[in-house]
Amino acid sequence: MTRQRGFTLIELVIVIAIVAILVAIAVPAYQDYVVRGRRTEAMTGLADLQLRQEQFRTNNPSYSLASPAFPVPTSTFYTFSIPTATATSYVVRAAATAAQRADTDCPQFEIGFNAGVTIRRPSPDTNNCWRR
């Protein structure tokens, strides 16, 4: 009597079900990880803008709005802007675009500077947006 080798249909269905459950758990967790990982791009761009604002201010009577002489960083996942800039204050902003809009906890980052005080928004940072 010869013995057949291979998987039965039931064994194959069980393996497929286990793989499907693992994928159903892993894919959303991975996507969340990727979205949170892209926040670093916003923080890096804002830090660059903040540094360039301070460099600009050392040679000029006020901070700068975005212009050809003072370009803002470009990014695939964030739009950077400078909504306000005066002699003593500025605000730099990174707003999520494209696939990063899935980051509903932290759709926008801001660094505000006013008379020597720096404020990061969202504030309070209840969703740990600024945590790396």
Image (spheres, rainbow, N blue to C red):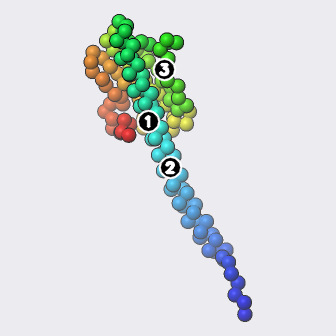
Q: Secondary structure at mark 1?
A: helix
Q: Quadrant of residue 76?
A: top right
Q: Secondary structure at mark 3?
A: loop
Q: Can residue 108 be seen here?
A: no
Name the outermost residue toward the bottom: 1
Q: Quadrant of residue 94?
A: top left
| Circle 3: residue type | Val
Question: As rendered, which of 116 and 101 lies closer to the eye?
Answer: 116
- Between marks 3 and 1, how big is the CA–CA gap? 16 Å
CB atoms of marks 3 and 1 within 8 Å: no
104 relative to 7 in the view: left or right = left
Q: Residue at x 56, y 65 (%)?
A: 18
Question: As rendered, which of 33 and 55 lies closer to the eye?
Answer: 55
Query: Which mark sits nearer the N-terminus, 3 or 1?
Result: 1
Q: Nearer the viewer, mark 2 or mark 3?
A: 3
- Residue 115 against residue 104 in the figure, above or below: above
| Residue placed under numbered mark 1 in the picture | 40
Q: Nearer the viewer, mark 2 or mark 1?
A: 1
- Residue 128 against residue 68 in the figure, above or below: below
| Circle 2: residue type | Tyr
Residue 29 x/y as whole percent: 48, 50
| Residue placed under numbered mark 2 in the picture | 30
Callout 1 crowding tier (Cα within 10 Å): few <14, some 14–19, many ≥20: some
Name the outermost residue toward the right: 1
Residue 19 x/y as whole percent: 57, 63
Q: Can residue 26 be seen here?
A: yes
Q: Which mark is residue 72?
A: 3
Question: As rendered, which of 69 and 110 lies closer to the eye?
Answer: 69
